[in-house]
Image: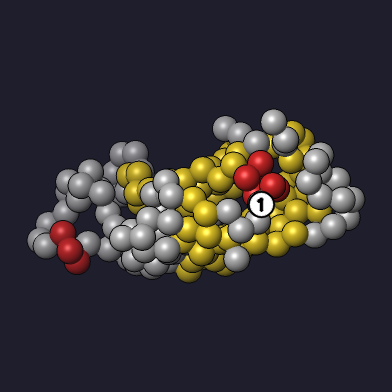
Amino acid sequence: MPVFSGLLKVRVCEAVDLKPTPWALRHAVGKSGSFLLDPYLALNLDQTRLGQTATRTKTNSPVWHQEFCTEVREGRSLELSVFHDAPIGYDDFVANCTIQLEDLLQNGTRHYEDWELFGLALHLVWASQVRLAVALSQFIAFLLSLCTRRNRSCCFL
């Protein structure tokens, strides 16, 4: 199984039309259709916390434009999880997805059908030697554009 080793930069751009889960709505007063989240995105690389965006208050279409950079040794997957910053107790889960770095390395135009997040844009860049995939110092950039839930697919452009 190919793995990624090198410098990984992840730029989290924005999310569009996030939906609160029923659990997030448990304390909501009034119509749930007008409920606004206080979302943030947590990034984990192989079960290790890479970083977390700032919380954007009262929006279901947050714009972050935050960049995270780390040196990776034999990385396999990048997990993105969106949470609602709850005022009381634990933060509420909104959505998540996992990007297998092997899939990105082997085929930059690969389509996925099992994403739960949609409308999330991020920019992945890495540079350095990657086994079986990328020559030393070659830069590869991907713009992830997740499609609507109806389509439930996403693609790397």
Q: Is residue 113 above or below residue 58?
A: above
Q: How is the image coloured?
A: secondary structure
Q: Is residue 157 above or below residue 98?
A: below
Residue 137 found in image quarter:
bottom right
Q: Which residue corresponds to the image point at 16% horizontal and 54% vertical from the top-left?
A: 28
In the image, farthest residue toward the left = 30
Q: Which residue corresponds to the image point at 29% horizontal and 44% vertical from the top-left?
A: 88
Residue 77 found in image quarter:
top right
* Residue highlighted by disc 1: 107
> Residue 2 location in percent, x, y?
72, 35
Amino acid under disc 1: Asn
> Residue 11 location in percent, x, y?
62, 60
Residue 45 found in image quarter:
top right
Residue nearest the observer in this picture, 29 or 67: 67
Residue 106 seen in this snapshot:
yes
> Residue 8 location in percent, x, y?
72, 50
Residue nearest the observer in this picture, 47 or 64: 47
Q: Is residue 47 above or below residue 43?
A: above
Classify mark 1: helix, strand or loop: loop
Neighbour tally class for label 1: few under 14, some 14-19, many 20 plus, Cα within 10 Å: few
> Residue 49 location in percent, x, y?
58, 39
Image quadrant for the N terminus?
top right
Q: Which residue corresponds to the image point at 72% horizontal and 36% vertical from the top-left?
A: 3
Residue nearest the observer in this picture, 127 or 111: 111
